Amino acid sequence: MLSIDPKQIAPAKLQGYLQSAVAPRPIAFASTLDKYGNPNLSPFSFFNVFSSNPPILIFSPARRVRDNTIKHTLINSQKTGEVVINVVNFDIVQQMSLSSTEYPDGVNEFEKAGFTMLPSDIVKPFRVAESPVQFECKINEIIALGNQGGAGNLVICEVVKIHIDEAVLDASGMIDQHKIDLVARMGGNWYSRSNVGMFEVEKPLTTLGVGVDMVPDFVLDCGYFDGNDLGKLGNIENIPTEEEIAIFVKTNFEVKAVLSADDSDKKYQKAKEYLDNGRVLEAWKLLLAKK
C-alpha cells in the first residue's frame, strides 16, 4: 500500500490524490457580484449541505495551488456577503465547465458560458436560469483554513430562498432524482452522472475559451444544439480561419457532399455528429463553411 505524509508531497499532487479519493462531490455553481455590481459565475466541488435548520450550505474557494492567489468568488463573497448557489445537472455540465475558465476580472461568465441571468428575489447576485435548483444565500461567515496555495476558505451560507424548476418534481411535489439528473465531480477530467455513471469533460483551464457569446446567431437559433453542445463550441481557443476552413472542405469529401446538397439540416446534423464525437474544431469548420 502506498503511504503518504501530506507534508512530504507537492501540494498539486496531494490535491490530485484528495480529489480522486474523496468523490463524487456535488458542485456549487456560485454566482456573485463584485463591489461594482459586475456578475461573476464559477463552479466549486468542495461543497455540501451541513444543516437544515437553519439551512446551511458550505463551499470552499481554495487558494490557487500554482501561485497562491485567491479567486474572484472569494473576493466578492468577502465584499458583499451574498451568493447564489445553483446546482448542476447533466444538461448544463459543458457550459458549467466552460465558466471555470479564468477569464480576466470583469468578464461576465454568464455570457461566456451562454447562461441566462435571472434576478434573485432577496439577494443581489443573479441566478442561473438553466439550473434546476437555485439557492439565494446570505453569507454568515468565511473561515480561512490557511494562507498557502491549496488552502480552502469555508464560505458558510444561510439559504434565504429556494427556487426549484417544477419539471424536476415528482407527483408528491418532491425532487425526483431521475428527473433532476445531477452531476458530481471526480478526479482529473472525470464526472459522475446520477444513475448513469462516469464521463469525461475536457478541462478548460489550459486555454481561454472564446465563449458561447462568440458562437454565430444562426447556430444559436437553429435548434439543433443544446447547452452542452454550445459549451463545447465555446471551449476552443481560436475560431478557425477562412484558410483553415477552406483546407478542411477541400480535403473532406463527406463535407463537400453535405455542402453541395445545400441543405442546412444536413449541415447541422453533421456538425452535431462531430460534437458528439469530440471533434469540436471540425464542427466549427463545417458550420462556418460556405457552399
Image (cartoon, grey):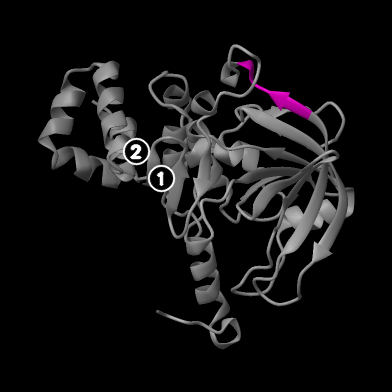
Foreground: 74 or 102? 74
Q: Is residue 265 above or below residue 276?
A: above
**Residue 164 magenta-highlighted:** yes
Label 2 residue SS: helix
Determine contact: label 1, label 2, CB under 8 Å: yes
The quadrant in which the N terminus is found is bottom left
Give the residues in magenta. 162-166
Label 1 residue SS: loop
Q: Residue at the location (51% across, 58% down)? A: 205
Q: Residue furthest front?
A: 1
Foreground: 37 or 85? 85
- Picture quadrant where residue 284 is located: top left
Q: Is residue 170 left or right of residue 237?
A: right
Q: Is residue 195 left or right of residue 60?
A: left
Q: Residue at the location (46% across, 20% down)? A: 221
Q: Whole-percent x and y of residue 125?
A: 79, 37
Q: Residue furthest left?
A: 253
Q: Is residue 143 above or below residue 119?
A: below
Residue holding disc 1: 239
Q: Residue at the location (87% across, 30% down)? A: 122
Tell me, yes or no, if residue 56 can be seen here: yes
Q: Is residue 281 left or right of residue 40?
A: left
Q: CA distance from mark 1 to mark 2?
A: 7 Å
Residue holding disc 2: 284
Q: Residue at the location (46% across, 30% down)? A: 216
Q: Residues within 10 Å of mark 1 (few under 14, many from 20)?
A: some
Q: Whole-percent x and y of residue 160?
A: 85, 33
Mark toward the start of the polypeptide (1 vs 2): 1
Q: Whole-percent x and y of residue 206?
A: 47, 61
Foreground: 140 or 32? 140
